[in-house]
Amino acid sequence: MGYKVVVVGATGNVGREMLNILAEREFPVDEIAVLASRKSLGTEVSFGDKTLKTKDLDTFDFTGWDMALFAVGSDATKIYAPKAAAAGCVVIDNSSLYRYDPDVPLIVPEVNADAILGYAKKNIIANPNCSTAQMVVALKPLHDRAKIKRVVVSTYQSVSGAGKEGMDELWEQTKAVYNPVTEVPPKKFTKQIAFNVIPHIDVFLDDGSTKEEWKMVAETKKILDPKIKLNATCVRVPVFVGHSEAINIEFEEPLDWQEAQDILREAPGIMLVDKREPGGYVTPIESVGEYATYISRVRQDPTVDNGITLWCVSDNLRKGAALNAVQIAETLGNRVLKKG
């Protein structure tokens, strides 16, 4: 016996990826509904070897459905997620709306699966920000061993994190570089993204940080440990898919790089690719379509007593969004609903 599953926002990048991953991982689905806004009504999407037509989110009745994976923005989620939850359908939300709600668990299954039991307060589970998700997968096993005091992270985030508009803008601007007659001014981003990097994701806050950077701090504390101090600089780079992060970690206890490698090699959700030679590391293009969070460049930081630096890469549409949501659904099924 399987589950009745709804995918909300099924025509977007993340919604389509959710459908792909549900099929790839053979999630036990008895019935599936794909929802979209009225402007996308009737659009066809793929689910395994099936082709499904989207239904109207505005009129859909969530009664009798087991879980709904939401891949729409906060505005739409604010309207429809409470309706689904009130109808008895557990919401797994990819937006930022509920991430900081103390009554809503924020889950990365490799890190804090036990916290999923808190879903019952609102019938909602939150999916973290893409840059946070891959980072905490890397931090968790090291934190268990040596207790993290402080993290300094610089992200190199692909344009797919800004949706289809971001990907289109990079594509059009790249073509325009080779065609001087054509000019493609920035719309989605604040400056030209082609052949450039932009140290600005989301809005600026009063302290000079951006909201994306604040999210990494707040979410890491909620998911992993409120005592961890974290400073982030988030940068948009001209890469279509795949987020990269340079992570510097200071521990309370000694930890050498060889032991860190051994720990990461055995950790769930991680693939260690770390050869100290040209090409002996993973780049974002190699992570596309993969489930793993890749770790490379593990080395000692000689500037602090107990410091490690590493390189972390993942497909942001997968682990940063769709895969993590499906893993939450799997955890919910295995630990709570227990139908599959």
Image: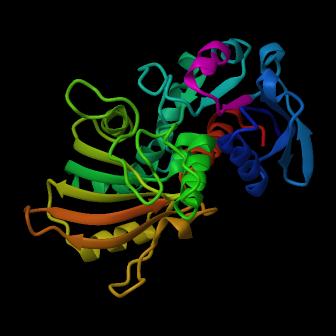
Can residue 22 be seen here? The reply is yes
Magenta range is 67-81
Residue 235 position, x and y percent, is: 36, 49
Residue 179 part of the magenta-drawn span? no
Residue 85, compared with residue 292, is above or below; it is above
Residue 240 visible: no
Residue 225 appears in which quarter of the rendering?
top left
Residue 159, given in percent of the width and then of the height, sits at: 52, 49
Left or right, 71 with reference to 277: right
Image quarter in which the C terminus is found? top right
Depth check: 222 or 235 in front?
235
Q: How many marks?
A: 0
Reply above or below: 17 against 267: above
Tell me: residue 328, above or below residue 250: above
Q: Position of residue 277 (x, y in %)?
A: 35, 88
Task: Tell me what residue is drawn at x 53 percent, y 51 percent.
Answer: 316
Q: Residue 22's spot in the image, x, y percent? A: 74, 48
Residue under the image location 60 percent in, 41 percent down: 165
**Along the viewing direction, whichever of 84 and 103 lies nearer the viewer:** 84
Residue in the image at 22% along x and 32% along y? 208
Q: Is residue 76 magenta?
A: yes
182 or 210, which is in the foreground?
182
Which residue is depicted at the point 29% across and 58% down?
A: 247
